[in-house]
Amino acid sequence: MEEVFRTNDPVKLSYIEHLLAEAGIPHFVLDRHISAVEGNIGAFPRRVVVDTADLGRARLALAGVEPG
């Protein structure tokens, strides 16, 4: 698995997931539930990962999205 995006912004995370789903790229969000531990202070960004074989397609699908 390779990380393709990380963010603290839940709206941007939803958008990233939408773009990957529309491109047919399976993905997984790491640290999605860490907010229960951190108290929603945003200290731990959520990381989106894809299979190594899908890395190129994922980067292409997310090319226009600014990080963060």
Image: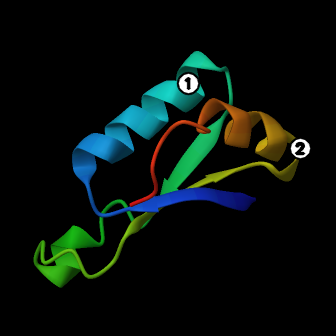
- Quarter-of-image position of residue 2: bottom right
Q: Provide the residue designation for mark 1.
A: 21
Relative to 40, 33 lies left or right: right
Quadrant in the rendering for residue 7 = bottom left
Give the residue type at disc 2.
Ala
Q: Which residue is mark 2?
A: 53
| 65, above or below 35, in the image | above
**Closer to the camera in the image, 33 or 7:** 7
> Residue drawn 29% across and 63% down?
8
Q: Which label's residue is closer to the chain start, 2 or 1?
A: 1
Q: Position of residue 55 (x, y in %)?
A: 79, 46
Q: CA distance from mark 2 to mark 1?
A: 16 Å
**Which residue appears farthest toward the right when viewing the image?**
53
- Seen at 55% across and 24% down, the residue is 21
Q: Secondary structure at mark 2?
A: helix
| Residue type pointed to by label 1 | Ala
Q: Would you place residue 40 above or below residue 51 in this image?
A: below
Q: Position of residue 13 (x, y in %)?
A: 36, 46
Q: Residues within 10 Å of mark 1 (few under 14, many from 20)?
A: few
Q: Secondary structure at mark 1?
A: helix
Rendering coords of residue 29 (x, y %) = 49, 53
Q: Residues within 10 Å of mark 2 (few under 14, many from 20)?
A: few
| Residue at (37% x, 70% y) in the render | 45
Q: Is residue 32 left or right of residue 30?
A: left
The quadrant of the picture occupied by the N terminus is bottom right
At 34% from the left edge and 37% from the top edge, which residue is drawn? Answer: 14
Residue 22 appears left or right of 33: right
Pick the quarter of the image with the C terminus.
bottom left
